[in-house]
Amino acid sequence: MEETPVKIITKEEMEKILGEGDLGKSGTLFGYGVIGNKKTGKIIEKFKVNRMTGEKTILFRDLNDEMFKKKKGGKK
Amino acid sequence: MSYMYHKVCKGIDQDGGSNNIFSWWKTNFNMPVPEIWDGNWVEGRGPFTYNELGTSFSLSGFSPGWELVAFFCGWHWDGPLYGTAYMYSQWRDENNNLMFTCANGSPVSLNLDSGYWQEYMYGCNQGVASWEVDVAGNYRVRSWSTGTGAMGQQDTTITFSNVPSTSQLSTSKKGYIWVEGNNLCFVNANRWKHTMVGNQESYVDTAKKGYMWIDSGIGYTLKWIGNDGYRYRCKWNIKQFASTWSNGPTGETFAGTSKKGYIWVDDEFGWTHLGYIASDGYKYLTGSGNYPYQAPY
C-alpha cells in the first residue's frame, strides 16, 4: 500500500503555497444568451456577457442567416 | 411577446446525458462547476435539462455548509425589438427581505427583426448557512427587466422545510480534524463540524486507529483507520479545476511534489471542504457532502 503521511497546516501556510483569495457571491461568471430564427428553427447566434464588466462576446453567429445578411446590407 | 422563466433545481445535465453534469443538492459549498452552457438551447428552457425541478424542498439530513439548489432565470423576447434590456434577479428570504442579487442590471442588446427571438439566462445558487437558508419558511426568487421589452416583477415561492441548525462552533475549534467512530470529522472554516463517512476497505489493525494519509496510487484518495481497525477511503475527491461560477477556484493548483501530504480546512473558496496536496503535487478537494458531478442523491 502506497501512502503519503498528511501534514496538517494553517491558513497562513496554505496561503503561502496557493496565494489565492475569495471571489464573491456564488453565481454564473457569465450570463449566456441566444438568438433564434422562428422560421428555420435554428439558433443563429450564441453569446455570453461578463457578469462584472458587461462585456459581450459572440461565441457563434450564422452569417448566412437572413437577418445578418440584411443588417450587413445596411438595414437597421 | 416577452416573458421570463424561473427554474429552481437540485442539479443540471445536458438533455438527459451524462456530460457536464453538476449537482448542488447536498454538496459542499462552491465546488468547481464545469462548462454547462454548450448544450442545445431550447426556448423557455435554456441549454440544459434540470434535475429535480421544484418549489418545495425538505432539508432532512442536511448539514450547514452544503448547497441546496440553483435558480436559473431566463428572459425571452420576440422581435421586432431594438434597444437594450437590463435584467435583475434575486433570492429573497422568508420575510421577503433581499438575501442577494443574482443579475443586477446586466445589460443585453436587442437587435431582433420580426420572426426572431432572443433569450438570456443567468444562474445563482443557495445553501444552508446563517447568511443563506437558516430557518424553515417560504423564500422566493424574483426577476424583472427594464429598458427595451421591459418585464414586470415575477416571484416564485420556494419553500424550505426541516432546516438544520446553522450555529457555529468557537473560533478556536476551526481546523480540528479527528477520527470519530469510523468516520473522519473536522471543523471547517465556517466552524461547522462535518463528518465524512468513508468506504470501508480491508482490515489493518485497531492499534492504528486514527492514522490518516493520502494514497499515492491512482486517485490520490484520503484514507484513514477507523476505531474498528478497518481502512476507510473518502467517498470522493476531485482535482481542483477552474469553475464557471463565481466564488470558486480559477484553475488547478500545482503546489509541487515537495508539498505532498499537506492538508487543511479550506478558507479560500466555499470554506467547508478539505484541501490537500497529493503525491503528484496537485491540490485535491474532498468533503462531507455528496459528489457534485453526478445526479443529485
Image (spheres, rainbow, N blue to C red):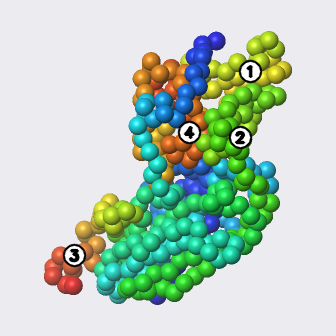
Q: Position of residue B297 (x, y in %)?
A: 72, 49
Q: Is residue B220 visible?
A: no
Mark pair 2, 4: CA separation? 13 Å
- Judge whether B253 appears above or below B192 on screen: above
Q: Is residue B121 visible?
A: yes
* Nearer to us in this view, A69 or A53: A53
The residue carrying mark 3 is A69
Residue kind at label 4, given as amino acid type: Asp
Element on which disc 3 rests = helix
The tag earlier along the polypeptide, 2 or 1, is 2
Residue at image location 64% in from the left, 12% down from the top: A1
Marks 4 and 3: which is nearer the front?
4
Q: Are marks 3 and 2 on the same chain?
A: no
* Nearer to us in this view, B17 or B283: B283
Residue at image location 63% in from the left, 20% down from the top: B213
Label 4 CA crowd tier, 10 Å (few <14, some 14–19, many 20+): many
Element on which disc 2 rests = strand
Q: Are marks 4 and 3 on the same chain?
A: no
The tag earlier along the polypeptide, 4 or 1, is 1
Residue kind at label 1, given as amino acid type: Gly
Q: Are marks 4 and 1 on the same chain?
A: yes
Q: Quadrant of residue B98?
A: bottom right
Label 1 CA crowd tier, 10 Å (few <14, some 14–19, many 20+): some
* Image disc number at residue B63: none
The residue carrying mark 4 is B266
Mark pair 3, 1: CA separation? 69 Å
Label 3 CA crowd tier, 10 Å (few <14, some 14–19, many 20+): few
The residue carrying mark 1 is B210
Residue at image location 54% in from the left, 62% down from the top: B124
The residue carrying mark 2 is B194
